[in-house]
Image (tube, rainbow, N blue to C red):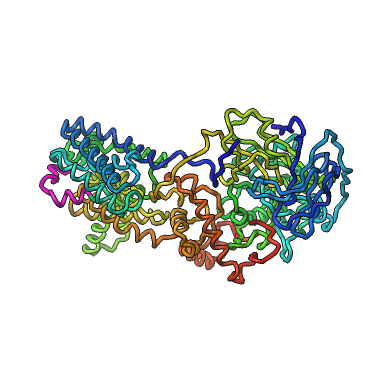
Amino acid sequence: MESKRLKKIPEKVIIPLKQHLGTICKPIVKKGDHVLIGQKIGESVSYCSSDVHSSVCGEVTSIEEYPNPNGNKVLSVIINTTDSQETVPFVPKKNPSQKDLIAIMQDAGIVEHYGAPTHTVLKPEGKKIDLVLINATASEWIGGKYATPKEYASQMIAALKLLMKASEAVKGAIIIRKDDKESIDAFEGVQVDGKALRVAPILGTRRLGHYFKDQNTNIVVASQQRIYGKNILNFFTYNVTGRKVSVGCNPTDVGVAVCGVKSAKALYDAVHEGKPYYETVITLEGTVDCPQFMLVRIGTPFKDILEGCNFNGEIGKIIANGVITGVAQYTNEVPVTKGTTRITLQTKEEVIRDESLACIHCARCVDACPVSLIPSRLSVLADQGRFDECRQMHIQFCIECGRCAFVCPSKIHILQLIRYAKNAIEGAYEDAAPKESSNLKIGCSCGSE
Amino acid sequence: MGYTISAPPHIKSSKSFRSINMAKILALIPLSLVSVYFFGIPALGIILASVLAAVLTEYGIQMITKQKVTIKDGHAAMIGLMFALLMPPEAPLWIPVVGAFFAIAIGKHAFGGIGSYIFNPVLVAWVFVRSAWGSYTTLTSIPHMGQLSDLVLENGAGLLVDVSPILLIGGVYLIYKKYIEWRVPLVFALTVFFFNQAIAFFSSVISLVQEGVLNPLMYLATMFIFLKVTDELSYVMIGVVFFGILFLATDSPTSPVTKNGRLIYGLACGILVSIYGYFGNYVDGTLYGIFLANAIAAYIETKTLPAMYGHESMLERSYRRVMKKIPSSLKFEVVSDDRV
């Protein structure tokens, strides 16, 4: 499965100056400037920020607030493209040191798909990382940028070594999905430090620690069930390493850095080819007749991607980042950003229009919940505004995976109600934050949400 | 061009309240047909009268109180059908009509409608009818599984539901298809079926003690009683017990939502039904037993709310305390993998 590029370059690209969590970049181009592919157009002003590059050749027409796939408007650079494919000279870096790597990451604008700039994940301020994980459980990228599976596997290992070097961590692991045979076959037998690799399944209490000891290496490839959801990092970390991340903290608090395949690949390219992060692979879903994977330039409006597909019928809903937790878009003018992983299209008929009924206590949500909450009760409490009681029932543990709302036969908007309560609780308790919660700090809010 | 925007998730499972009710009704239709074949026209009359009365009552109540009419979701029809199946075929036609009215009006709507009632409306109506007009609802025969063919067609059936225990297999299919949850029926069934063996086991142990037997092998041998089919068990293998396990106890508003709570609820149902059944008969025992278990369902639920995610339960804590004391040379498990 080779990913395809768009047939023509979009007429206009919109590059948001904030494609990460943290401070917004300062634009360093102005209206009327001519930019080249890979030219830096936004410069980060603090550590918790990541540079932004142009993905096309063209002329800057304006810098204004523009719709973003996360639902808000973000200051963006709008570029009218020209046909040229001229790039700025890419300079690969030979044998980079740890400091160089961190600088390269910020310079090349490498950002995790969940928003945190990669260098802040690997080298968080005031925390020490001793384990780097590459989460490849959403392994759609295998066909995206690689010719063969083996190339994917060896590049991932090389990228993991770079990440480990950058974070000064001793150990590293790649986590792939249990049912993804393609990836498992790709990694099986790859030579690492003269040893053939074995994919280790994570079962019960046999977590990474066991395999580090068992295989006597510092690099392990493990497989586990698919986890999906919005705030899954803490849950993922616990599942894989057994380290508990308390509520309100992120994996870096326990010394774990979680990276995605995309950012690992971007780092590999940045080091070996000197290319900044201006292209990404996205998946298209729905009744669409077009390649499943598509290599697009960051800033391409959804409109141009959809024009390249033969969509049957009228579009009812455009969803960025998956049907369970993604955000439905109100316009097709929004651009692809570094955080966009997939676009889902639904026809008018597919859009669900159910009415909520009373809860029938069927307990399907309780069975579906991966973090043993009682969503049915939480949604009732949230609906009545009894947020303190929600807090007593550990609502903060919710990873917002949306499974409860998916299975609900009464079609109650459980996820929405839980988010509502969580927001209210965060707003109410922020000033009275207890000391043990380490990330309720003001200012830089890098890391996972 | 406008696009729909809404909060996630953007797809939902196809199971709805309506489809769950319809599935339950479908699962009960074979049994109803066999009961009509077996008991003739009176059974058909009872089923039709009960279903019609239930649906009309719901329609009437929702019209009078100006609520949205929800007879299309099939819940009222399901209650009516279930109530009809609990009637003896000799009952006059007005009994199911009054019973179905009572089930919907008092059992369901007086408590606040779907999801709010604390007692299963079917059982509420049954208990009411049973105590108000006992003479009409007394069984002419208590079913009892004499031979295996009784599982297919029970000749001593006293209620419509007893005619063919095997036809309730639809309920098992619903569990497999996840229309009905599996914890309550599994624990309930195990408790009911092993209760008699447990009693036989304890009585034989006690008799051994009274005889002053000291040989431990004799005591161990009594364990084999659990493998023996006791006579009492044939009174358990009847339609109404299966019906109670698969359809009445699993009624979702009247059972706890927590995972452990459902196990405990199944156990409570099983013990109550067995006590009633052992000392009385299993027909009344099942229905009264589940009715009483409904009363403690809410208590079970509030007492079994899960602890914070990732916390050790009491069992895990004590297991670890014991394992710590055992020298590592004796252990066969993976050592120290909690932290990397």
Residue A338, image x, y percentages: 71, 46
Above or below: residue A240 compared with residue A184: below
Q: Residue furthest left?
A: B135
What secondary structure predominates along the stretch shown in magenta?
helix
**Towards the viewer: A106 or A273:** A106
B129 in the magenta segment: yes
> Residue at 68% across / 60% down in the picture?
A445
Q: Is residue B81 left or right of residue B179?
A: left
**Towards the viewer: A240 or A406:** A406
Above or below: residue A72 compared with residue B177: below
On the rendered image, what quadrant is the N terminus of chain A found in? top right
- Residue A194 seen anywhere in this rendered image of the structure: no
Q: Count the labels in the image.
A: 0
Residue A86, image x, y percentages: 87, 38
* Magenta segment boundaries in residue numbering: B125-142
Q: Is residue A286 left or right of residue B49?
A: right
Res A8 quadrant in image? top right
- Residue B259 seen anywhere in this rendered image of the structure: yes
> Residue at 29% across / 34% down in the picture?
B29
Q: Is residue A340 left or right of residue B112?
A: right
Above or below: residue A427 compared with residue B81: below
Res A131 quadrant in image? bottom right
**Towards the viewer: A100 or A184:** A100
Q: Is residue B243 left or right of residue B128?
A: right
B178 in the magenta segment: no
On the rendered image, what quadrant is the C terminus of chain A found in? bottom right
Residue B18, image x, y percentages: 38, 40
**Towards the viewer: A288 or B64:** B64
Residue B116, image x, y percentages: 34, 53
